[in-house]
Image (cartoon, rainbow, N blue to C red):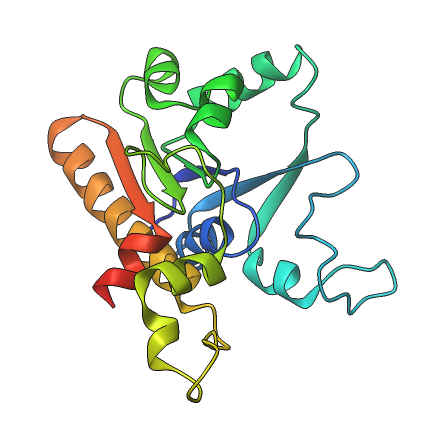
Amino acid sequence: MPPLSGIRVIDFGRYIAGPYCGMLLADMGADVIRIDRRQGSEDRYVAPVTREGEGAGFMSLNRNKRNLTLDTAKPESAEIIRRLVKGADVVIANLPIGVLKKMGLDYESLKAIKPDIILARISTFGPDGPYANRVGFDMVAQAMSGVMSLTGFPGAPVRALIPFEDYGTALHTAFGVMVALFHKARTGEGQIVDGSLLSTGVTF
């Protein structure tokens, strides 16, 4: 039996950091349900490799997951999210803090539904400070962490080809989720696990 059998994860992740975190948990046996937009979220069609236009990254990062499409703009979606959260152990979301609150995915809202929920919250700049509500990608974190000054040739900065800030943040967050699950098994308490691309870049 896989080690995470019986653990359910609701995955609101997009692109790399959130989905890769969810994929790692799914590979270990967790029941991971990815929540998608009705016509497919924006990361589904990047670098298409199938007749339907699905991308290689999307297909590999969402392996071993189930999928549910949801129109979060409709008020009815709030009840569906509530029911999903009620039956979950972990929620993964790499969305700005303001968007989390608007969707009812902030920790206070989730905890009101499921007191022992674990929220894995991934962002570019972390949950506080002047950039907390800004969005960004791996390349932005590479530039701001200083790694671009260490690559390439004299002159203009060059990004690392592998988006290691995304993958590294996903690894840090998945480790945090495992520690949180261990803590929950001993105490019954949930918590927030925070991952940020910029923190990963500075750490690495």
Horizontal side, residue 73 vs residue 13: left or right: right
In percent of width and height, residue 43 lies at 66, 52
Q: Residue at x 46, y 24 (%)?
A: 98
Q: Residue furthest right?
A: 51
Q: Residue at x 49, y 42 (%)?
A: 135
In percent of width and height, residue 77 lies at 64, 17
Please, is residue 117 above or below residue 65 in the view? above
Q: Is residue 92 visible?
A: yes
Q: Residue furthest left?
A: 186
Q: 136 or 114: which is nearer to us?
A: 136
Of the 4 image quadrants, the one containing the N terminus is: bottom left
Q: Quadrant of residue 144?
A: bottom left
Q: Residue at x 66, y 35 (%)?
A: 68
Of the 4 image quadrants, the one containing the C terminus is: bottom left
Count the marks: how many? 0
Q: Residue at x 19, y 33 (%)?
A: 184
Please, is residue 62 above or below residue 72 in the view? below
Q: 197 or 59: which is nearer to us?
A: 197
Q: Residue furthest front?
A: 155
Q: Quadrant of residue 92?
A: top left
In percent of width and height, residue 19 lies at 51, 52
In percent of width and height, residue 16 lies at 51, 57
Q: Residue furthest bottom?
A: 153
